[in-house]
Image (cartoon, rainbow, N blue to C red):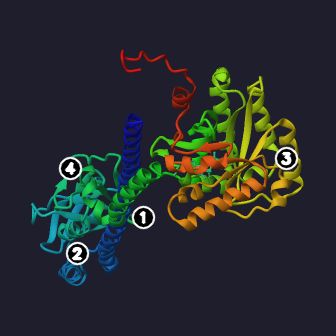
Amino acid sequence: MFRAKINKTYVRITASIAAFLLIAALGVASVSWQTSQGLKHDGQESLRQAVRQIDKMFDNANMAVTALKPFIGKPCTRDVVLELRRQIAIVPNVRTINLATNDNIYCTALFGPQDGIVDSKSYVDNRLLLMTGNAVTPNHALIAYREQFGENSILIGVDGYYLHNILDLLSTRSHLVLRVGPTWMDHLGKVHQEPYNMDEDNLQLSSSRYPYQVALTVHHTNHWQYALDYSPASLFLFPLLGIFVGVMTFMLLGRVGTPLAIMKNGIANQEFIPYFQPVVDGTHHQLTGCEVLMRWQQPQAGLVPPYQFIPLAEESGLIVEMTRQLMTQTQAFFAPQVDLLPDGFHFGFNICAGHFKDLSLVDDCKNFLSAFKGRKIHLVLELTERELIEPSAVTDSLFKALRRMGVLIALDDFGTGHSSLTYIQKFHIDFLKIDQSFIGRIGTDALSGHIVDNVIDLAKRLEMVIVAEGIETQAQVDYLTPYHLEFFQGYFFGKPVPPEDFVKQWLRPKPPVSTPAGSA
Ligand code: G
Ligand code: G
Ligand code: MN
């Protein structure tokens, strides 16, 4: 039993930890998913913002182009150069403006007439070129915006500083880069010529109006750093939920169940066992029978006394099945050794109102009696006077059937209730068992003695076989002896004991004791 208990605690703890871990795993998965979704969502939002800002820059460049359309292909006069400079001054983001014919730059805002070379094929879509710098500021990143009109073109230089600013500002949780064809700028403003390494976790967004993309990488190493930002509730909720579910699992597994469920379980496990108390004859105090008393051998609580479970058993009706088990165990134990029993041995079972709902008691008694084929035993059913059975069609046929089988009826706890003579006659009572409370009064005071005398008198006048219950002392025996009662029962003769002890104490012929010489 101890071992079973340990195993059970071990199982409970294991199951509770498993439940906690399951919730924790769910939590980790949930936090991870929320974080990656959040990072992705925020990344996409950053990309959209970046495209909006960068498009606006190129829109500005485009504005300058529109303003300069009348000067396309015109010679690089002072007026033209002044107009180029005026646009630089008034249009945001624009740093340089050049005019070109084919691949020849012939007019610049800074230097006026020129004879420079431009490789128009290096422009992505003929429109954009990302550069590490130009002739004037070689180490300052710059993006050239080009618009072509026949063989002429306008080249607008947009400062890399603005691009760098946009990328930097939006690179909160992951780093943004701007890609123009094979060239890309990182969030620090550095321009790279080597191919940009795109792996699976990259997000990118192309502008619908200009030939460039912005991209970003969500780094796995950063993932858990942002868990608190994206799933603050889950980070607290799941551990709490895990603890709650773990504790609940532990408690539910240890749940004892309702008293009724425990009792049903006890029936299934045959935990209700018979104890036997001897009944002796009133003259020679020889064994004449026994009262079978129910005990509950409960694995956890040990031996449970009847007053703790009989009321619930009677109320719920489980008493019928429990009494059946008591009868079965009694016959299984005594039938094989029936020869040990004195002739006419009485087996008394306690019966309550629940037994009179149907006729199953008849079958139970039939089974009991048929186990003792020789018929040298008597079956006695003890009905308590405390709660009398209502006469009805069912009880009527039940008592008739019992009588036919030879089953005897005892009125238990006599004197405590209020059974009438008509009642006693109607149910054909064979024995009256005078309640032990009266026997207990013997020798206490004059009035008590009077009450005891009266109860015995009443029983005698009913002309029934009488059992005096609860005899505990020699004085009580002496007091009762002149009444010539048929049977005695009580601790003075023997307490209720398990079947093996009953056989040992009352039925096994004692081995002859070798008397020490000189003692006889
Ligand atoms: O044996 P003990 O004195 O502890 O029993 C207490 C009460 O329980 C007594 O009133 C006795 O009649 C009752 N009792 C014992 N066994 C049974 C039983 O098998 N059926 C019923 N109905 N009552 C029992
Ligand atoms: O209600 P019922 O008469 O069935 O009750 C019988 C119960 O009385 C038994 O279960 C038994 O434990 C108890 N009993 C039997 N003899 C004595 C006795 O001498 N003294 C006391 N106190 N109880 C007894
Ligand atoms: Mn009884």
- Which secondary structure lies at badge 1? loop
- Which secondary structure lies at badge 4? loop
Separation of residues labelled 3 and 1 (CA atoms): 98 Å
> Dividing the picture into quarters, in which one does residue 284 lie?
top right
- The residue under label 1 is 208
Separation of residues labelled 4 and 3 (CA atoms): 107 Å
- The residue under label 2 is 94
- Tell me where residue 221 appears, x and y as whole percent: 24, 51
- The residue under label 4 is 193
Q: Observer-nearest residue: 402 or 194?
A: 402
Separation of residues labelled 4 and 2 (CA atoms): 23 Å
- Which secondary structure lies at badge 2? strand
The amino acid beneath tag 3 is: Leu
- The residue under label 3 is 398
Separation of residues labelled 2 and 3 (CA atoms): 114 Å
The amino acid beneath tag 1 is: Ser
The amino acid beneath tag 2 is: Val
Q: Observer-nearest residue: 2 or 389?
A: 389
Q: Observer-nearest residue: 121 or 165?
A: 165
